[in-house]
Image: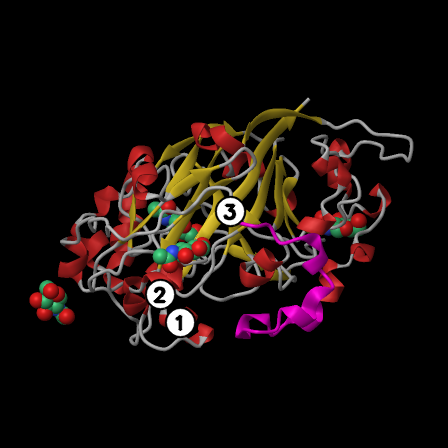
Amino acid sequence: MLTSTVALLALLTPAFASPINRRDPSFVDPALAGHLRRRAPASSDTTFNSSTVTNAKVVPLNPKRVLPTTGTYAKTSSTTSPSATSTQASTSTWSEVSSWSEVSSSTTQPSATTTQASSTWTSVTPSATSTGYTSPFDLAWSASGWSFFDSWDFFTSTDPTHGAVTFNDLGTSWDLGLLSVTENTATLRTDNWTTLASGANRNSVRITSKEKVTSGSLVVFDVAKAPYGKSVWPAMWSVGDNWPAGGEIDIFEGVNNVAKNQMTLHTSPGCTLSKPMNATGTILATDCDSSVNYNEGCGVQDPSSRSYGAGLNKAGGGVYVMYQDDNGIAIWFFLHDNIPDDIKNGTPAFRNWGLPRARWDASSCDMAEYFAAQTLVINITICGDWAGSSSAWSAAGYSGTCAEAVMDPNNFDDAIFEFNSVKVYSPK
Ligand SMILES: *[C@@H]1O[C@H](CO)[C@@H](O)[C@H](O)[C@H]1NC(C)=O
Ligand SMILES: *[C@@H]1O[C@H](CO)[C@@H](O)[C@H](O)[C@H]1NC(C)=O
Ligand SMILES: *[C@@H]1O[C@H](CO)[C@@H](O)[C@H](O)[C@H]1NC(C)=O
Ligand SMILES: *[C@@H]1O[C@H](CO)[C@@H](O)[C@H](O)[C@H]1NC(C)=O
């Protein structure tokens, strides 16, 4: 698999402008590569200058830097959510506020398990009677508060997607002020205090779970804030060994100023998304094969304009839930004010969850064949193959280039993940 991953890289690399791969494709950790390619290159693409990128050093600390203070990030109170559209109209990213009422109202949540879309979920759907229910899960592990970072390894290799970032180890990340914890929250961010020279990388963080997530498990990312902004490309995702053989599940991902989350699978050849999806998202592509269309993957866009970016954070964040078993993979999203009780109570049971936002059925993708045990990944990249692409850049309506955006620390004030928790449940 290593050989074929490298061969794939070698095959695709000449089409891309970044010299990093071409010079040394072996830096890609095949277990954690992921997202090797997004789209076909355009002749107008912004590219990084190879010599400046190659020679970039970790930029020394600015003595005047402001360390992120712990515990001061106010959560948006629920009173600003879903009704407060009038207070949220100030930037272009709020243009879709008119549609919020549809997606945020709890009345759109189907109310009982009879509305569970697919019979394939019944094996894990307990009886949700009004008198009570039993969760089919036990908590396997969770990361939160003071000990949040104990559950993760810090990835320090070059960004496989050519982002203008330096990923730091645990100690360096603390020293640089990229991490903070309180009793109830943990944050990771990119440097928003250093002005960089042209071509230099910005300090950021990428963490990978020490434990793997196996089939039949449920993953719940509870975020108070998620990163967004000019040139920013965050993700919460998972990947199996020997990518793409072990599969990749992108649970939360977006770039720049988009308002809607994108969920995507990337696999070996032969796995596709079946229609009807029985989920509320918009299908972007159906072939999950990483070798098709520059690893576009089989992606689904969340219908909610508060599933990513400024809208999400203004609403106080939300939870992203991923469930995978031999019958399929599904991702749900709930805004902070609409989190079902069973999830809040730590006894998840698919109660009143309604349709997922995205769903990939096993009828066209043998889950056991395409997905190995998954390592969770949380990272914040800057520019790179997606955020910095000419298509994404022009869609965002930004002036200047992505390379210029990296230099200005003011672009990274919102490049923050603030977690209430990450929880993994295994089947009872
Ligand atoms: C790339 O950067 C190097 C070092 O700063 C510079 O000498 C060279 O002219 C640059 N090349 C291009 C194409 O901008
Ligand atoms: C979607 O749901 C319908 C109705 O429950 C079911 O008949 C169909 O098989 C489902 N399709 C998929 C792909 O799960
Ligand atoms: C970082 O996140 C991006 C966004 O999903 C992903 O494509 C990329 O592979 C990640 N890179 C690293 C080195 O974590
Ligand atoms: C960095 O961003 C935080 C908000 O995330 C902000 O409070 C702080 O002032 C910013 N730092 C600088 C130096 O601008």
Q: Is residue 349 above or below residue 96?
A: above
Mark 2 or mark 3: name the one nearer the start of the chain.
Answer: 3
Mark 1 or mark 2: name the one nearer the start of the chain.
Answer: 2
From the viewer's side, name the closer residue of 377 and 64.
Answer: 64
> Which quadrant holds residue 328?
top right
Report x, y in % for residue 308.
Answer: 56, 58
> Which quadrant holds residue 76?
bottom right
Report x, y in % for residue 347.
Answer: 72, 30
Looking at the image, do the residues carrying marks 2 and 3 touch, with CB atoms under 8 Å apart? no
Q: Label 1: how many residues lie within 10 Å, few (<14), some (14-19) or many (20+)?
A: many
SS at circle 2: loop
Report x, y in % for residue 196.
Answer: 23, 60
The residue lying at 75 percent from left, 28 percent from top is 135
Q: Is residue 129 above or below residue 90?
A: above
Q: CA distance from mark 3 to mark 1?
A: 32 Å
SS at circle 1: helix
From the viewer's side, name the closer residue of 405 and 125.
Answer: 405
The residue lying at 51 percent from left, 37 percent from top is 371
Mark 3 or mark 1: name the one nearer the start of the chain.
Answer: 3
Q: Which mark is residue 72?
A: 3
On the question of residue 301 being in view, the answer is: no
**Mark 1 Cβ inside 8 Å of ligand 3:** no
Query: Mark 3: which amino acid?
Result: Thr
Q: In the rendered image, which quarter contains the N terminus?
A: top left
Of circles 3 and 1, the one toward us is 3
Residue under pointer 1: 393
Q: Is residue 345 above or below residue 16?
A: above
Q: Which mark is residue 388?
A: 2
Report the span colored magenta: 73-99
Of circles 2 and 3, the one toward us is 3
SS at circle 3: loop
User: Any magenta on residue 90?
Assistant: yes
